[in-house]
Image (cartoon, helix red, strand yellow):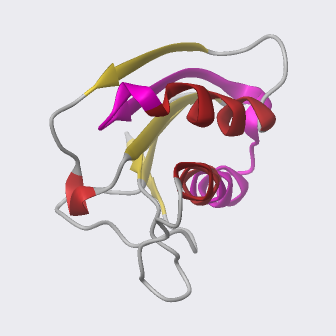
Amino acid sequence: MKDIVSTNAPAPIGPYSQAIVAGNLLFVSGQVAIDPATGDLVMDDIATETTRVMENIKAILTEAGTDFSRIVKTTIFLKDMADFAAVNTVYGSYLSPPFPARETVAVAGLPKNVNVEISVTVLLG
């Protein structure tokens, strides 16, 4: 059985759910820097863009009754690996030890031509 989590994070831009609960796991789809209030991209700089991504993830976690401390796995997609340090600084400010497992992957392109997309898997309960 799977349950959809609907939140005040940006609506999906395709045929997928923001997040799905399956058993004791929450799978959060890749989030980009869309402001849920306006629907506009927030891409002033990579730190601001990453902050918006993390705030979108936070909204989904809150709706699901959990928080960043329960994340067990993240995937970060970067359009330019030169942004790694700045993204890592913002990302790290939302987490505390023990940190989740993670990979960071450079990609040729991302939806809406954003610079960063992050997905997470969370252990519930």
- Residue beneath the point at 61% across and 35% down: 86
Quarter placement of the C terminus: top right
Question: Of all residues shown, which one is farthest toward the bottom?
Answer: 38
- Residue beneath the point at 23% across and 47% down: 110
Instruction: Name which quarter of the figure residue 105 lies in.
Output: top left
- Residue 104 in view (yes/no): yes
Q: What is the count of numbered marks?
A: 0
Q: Position of residue 90 (x, y in %)?
A: 69, 39
| Residues shaded magenta | 55-82
18 or 2: nearer the viewer:
18
- Residue beneath the point at 52% across and 75% down: 35
- For residue 5, above or below residue 50: below
- Residue beneath the point at 57% across and 36% down: 87
Asked if the magenta segment contains residue 77, the reply would be yes
93 or 63: nearer the viewer:
93
Q: Position of residue 118 (x, y in %)?
A: 45, 39
Asked if the magenta segment contains residue 34, the reply would be no
Task: Name the side, left or right, on which 31 lies relative to 73.
Answer: left
Q: Position of residue 73 (x, y in %)?
A: 54, 19
Quarter placement of the N terminus: top left
Task: Name the side, left or right, on which 113 lies relative to 26.
Answer: left
Q: Position of residue 31 (x, y in %)?
A: 43, 51
- For residue 102, above or below residue 84: above
- Residue 22 in view (yes/no): no
Question: Of all residues shown, which one is farthest toward the front?
Answer: 82
- For residue 69, above or below residue 101: below
